């Protein structure tokens, strides 16, 4: 079994996304979504597609586990840009929580990106994204998705 096997299936999603990043804002947009996830390579790979009908876009994530290191690389793409976003975030699960980091840019500035998968049960889970602009001294969470098993 793979670390992301819990995610296989259909989900209803409630997203909260920060309206403005890097300005200390606490104003959030909340919107619904639906997601379907699958695994491949006997659990060493994971793919999902998420639809945000009120936002006018969809996204997909590909996750692949490095056989030698055990680390997962997570890649994102969305229908607005139509490209595989690079670089991936990389990490692993420890004690039921998956933490993944990567270097990126946001609004023209270099950032450190962090994904956390947590609160995993058979019927629910949570994903969040945070950015750091100060070398991981502080983090601003800017997107949270609460998943509940559909149907």
Image (cartoon, grey):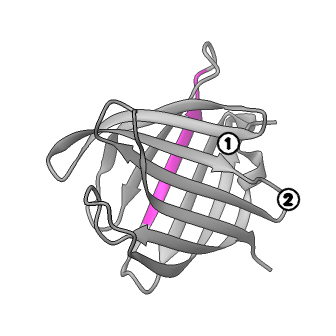
Q: Circle 2 sits on which residue?
A: 122
Report the residue at 14% width, 47% height from top: 108
Calculate the distance from the C-alpha at mark 2 to the C-alpha at mark 1: 19 Å
Determine whether label 2 and label 1 are within 8 Å by CB: no
Circle 2 — which element? Answer: loop
Quadrant of the frame with the C terminus: bottom right
Residue 66 in the image: x percent, y percent?
58, 22
Report the residue at 82% width, 36% height from top: 1
Q: Is residue 21 above or below residue 71?
A: below
Is residue 25 in the magenta section?
no
Q: Which residues are magenta?
A: 59-66
Residue 142 in the image: x percent, y percent?
41, 59
Given residues 150 and 117, the one toward you in this image is: 117
Q: Main secondary structure of the magenta part?
A: strand
Q: Is residue 96 above or below residue 76?
A: above
Furthest-top residue in view? Answer: 68
Q: Circle 1 sits on which residue?
A: 40
Furthest-left residue in view? Answer: 108
């Amino acid at each position: 079994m793979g670390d992301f096997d819990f995610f296989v299936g259909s989900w209803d999603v409630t997203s909260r996304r920060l309206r403005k990043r890097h300005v200390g804002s606490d104003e959030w947009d909340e919107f619904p979504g639906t997601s379907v996830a699958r695994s491949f390579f006997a659990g060493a790979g994971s793919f999902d597609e998420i639809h945000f009908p009120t936002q006018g876009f969809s996204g997909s994530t590909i996750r692949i586990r490095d056989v030698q290191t055990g680390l997962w690389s997570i890649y994102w793409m969305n229908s607005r840009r139509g490209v595989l976003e690079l670089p991936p975030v990389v990490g692993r699960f420890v004690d039921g929580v998956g933490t993944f980091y990567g270097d990126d840019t946001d609004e023209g500035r270099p950032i450190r990106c962090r994904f956390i998968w947590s609160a995993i049960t058979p019927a629910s889970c949570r994903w969040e994204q945070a950015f750091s602009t100060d070398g991981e001294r502080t983090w601003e969470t800017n997107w949270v998705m609460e998943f509940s098993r559909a149907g």
